[in-house]
């Protein structure tokens, strides 16, 4: 995390006269960081540290006026001494340093480190009890919002001219993401007091996404239990350095996957993690099989019906494109919530639950229509403090966290610089730096990252 020097400061002591060619300037020490300033030296400055230069001129020429004449006299030449004093950048936990990182990464606020003695229970106990209450009316209202907005999207796709189809797909893909959030609440037992109702609603909500509900629920519970823990977290992970170096073909695939294709990498996660029975415990397998059967039944019945009624192009228009829109949000929400250059992934020995959930999770504001259709899934910090908080109570819980723990929270507004930072910087795991970018490790093979740096806007 580099500090940028905006300027160098010079203090001149003694008479402020201009030196002549006869005056020679030497650094105070042969290894001075100011060595590059002086004649005969070629060393360039290191702008990663602010440098304050103290230069003392002795015996410089003095000007005397004598009526209409000016005479410059040289009394004697003396050595001019320069002293370079390095001033350390602001400490990593200082307000100035965090503000600098906010500007660099596209954040609104980067939180202070949470003290080690604070526990997750300490944070949960500050939340008002009402945020944990399940309200059936609000829960089913969220279902109505998603069903209505999705139906409207399908209507827009059917009626829109070809040049407006991207807008219709964007709306419909966002609306169907609301189905995922409803199933997400069911998986966390925050939708209904009736567990059977939650299992049925969750399974049905996931079907249009061809997402198997139970496999996802098991993996997602592990994500909450091991948030930002190396190896154990089932969501995004930094790339393992050994994996990156293991094969040129795999390295190229990783660079594309964690670069330009990262907003759709949840497709790979969906495919790899949820259909292999070997990835689940014996007591989970039966429920996993039921979910897989439901998904395969939807594909076997629903897809042929769509193709029969609208043709293969209709299948692409009405199902595939909104599905890709959903995966854009699935990928984007997940990586924005937990990925930033200042947010570390830690080994199980170093991991701290309270720090991971409060310090290691990001609240991000999106345009209002996205937040409404996605049922405030972006209000993510309280959800990680306690997954039992229903989606319709997340804002109240977030306000309470701001009042009690606000200085420790990471907050942003969705912007180009934020996305550019994630896509071009947050790549390979490094214990001290958190991440090393692909183009630092393999510049010759990182053309996709160089391309993103050139074409993505850099404003927040």
Image: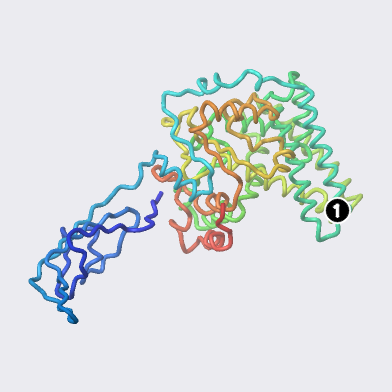
Q: Could you tell me residue 69's position as x and y percent?
A: 17, 81
Q: Could you tell me residue 416's position as x and y percent?
A: 59, 53
What is the residue that sits farthest to the front in this orientation?
67
Residue at figure coordinates x 60%, y 56% from the top left: 260
Residue at figure coordinates x 64%, y 27% from the top left: 396
**Foreground: 446 or 4?**
4
- Above or below residue 244? Residue 272 is above
Please tell me whether mark 1 sits on a helix, a strand or a loop: helix
Residue at figure coordinates x 46%, y 61% from the top left: 443
Q: Residues within 10 Å of mark 1 (few under 14, many from 20)?
A: some
Q: Is residue 334 left or right of residue 193?
A: left
Image mark count: 1
**Foreground: 392 or 404?**
404
Q: Could you tell me residue 169's position as x and y percent?
A: 78, 51
Tell me where residue 297 sits by quadrant: top right
Tell me where residue 191 sits by quadrant: top right
Q: Is residue 98 left or right of residue 220?
A: left
- Above or below residue 12? Residue 68 is below
What is the residue that sits farthest to the left in this orientation?
76
**Foreground: 126 or 435?**
126
What residue is pinned by disc 1?
Answer: 314
Residue at figure coordinates x 39%, y 57% from the top left: 6
What is the residue that sits farthest to the right in this orientation?
309
């Amino acid at each position: 995390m580099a500090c940028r020097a905006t300027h160098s400061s010079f203090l001149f002591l003694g008479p402020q006269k201009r030196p002549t060619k006869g005056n020679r300037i030497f650094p105070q020490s042969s290894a001075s960081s100011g060595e590059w300033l002086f004649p005969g030296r070629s060393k360039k400055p290191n702008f990663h540290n602010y440098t304050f230069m103290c230069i003392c001129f002795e015996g410089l020429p003095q000007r005397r006026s004598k009526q209409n004449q000016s005479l410059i006299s040289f009394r004697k030449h003396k050595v001019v001494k320069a002293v370079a004093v390095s001033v350390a950048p602001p400490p990593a936990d200082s307000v100035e340093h965090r503000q600098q990182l906010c500007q660099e990464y596209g954040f609104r606020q980067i939180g202070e480190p949470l003290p080690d003695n604070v526990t997750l229970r300490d944070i949960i106990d500050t939340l008002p009890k009402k945020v944990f209450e399940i309200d059936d009316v609000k829960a089913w209202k969220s279902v109505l919002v998603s069903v209505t907005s999705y139906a409207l999207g399908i209507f827009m796709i059917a009626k829109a001219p070809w040049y407006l189809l991207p807008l219709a797909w964007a709306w419909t893909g966002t609306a169907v993401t609301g189905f995922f959030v409803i199933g997400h609440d069911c998986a966390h037992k925050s939708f209904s007091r009736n567990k059977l109702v939650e299992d049925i609603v969750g399974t049905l909500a996931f079907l249009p996404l061809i997402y198997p509900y139970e496999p996802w629920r098991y993996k997602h519970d592990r994500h909450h239990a091991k948030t930002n823990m190396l190896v154990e977290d089932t969501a995004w992970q930094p790339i393992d350095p050994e994996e990156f170096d293991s094969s040129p073909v795999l390295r190229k695939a990783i660079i594309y996957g964690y670069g330009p294709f990262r907003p759709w990498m949840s497709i790979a996660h969906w495919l790899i993690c949820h259909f292999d029975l070997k990835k689940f415990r014996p007591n989970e397998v039966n429920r996993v099989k039921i979910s897989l059967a439901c998904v395969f039944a939807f594909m076997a019945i629903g897809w042929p019906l769509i193709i029969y009624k609208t043709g293969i192009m209709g299948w692409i228009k009405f199902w595939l494109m909104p599905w890709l829109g959903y995966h854009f949000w699935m990928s984007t929400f997940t990586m924005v919530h937990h990925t930033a250059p200042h947010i570390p992934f830690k080994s199980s020995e170093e991991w701290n639950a309270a720090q991971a959930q409060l310090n290691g999770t990001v609240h991000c504001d999106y345009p209002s229509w996205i937040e409404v259709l996605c049922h405030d899934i972006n209000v993510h910090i309280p959800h990680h403090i306690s997954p039992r908080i229903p989606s319709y109570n997340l804002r109240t819980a977030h306000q309470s966290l701001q009042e009690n723990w606000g200085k420790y929270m990471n907050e942003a507004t969705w912007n180009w610089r934020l996305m550019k930072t994630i896509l071009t910087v947050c790549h390979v795991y490094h214990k001290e730096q958190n991440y090393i970018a692909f183009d630092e490790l393999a510049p010759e093979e990182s053309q996709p990252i160089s391309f993103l740096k050139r074409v993505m806007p850099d404003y927040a």
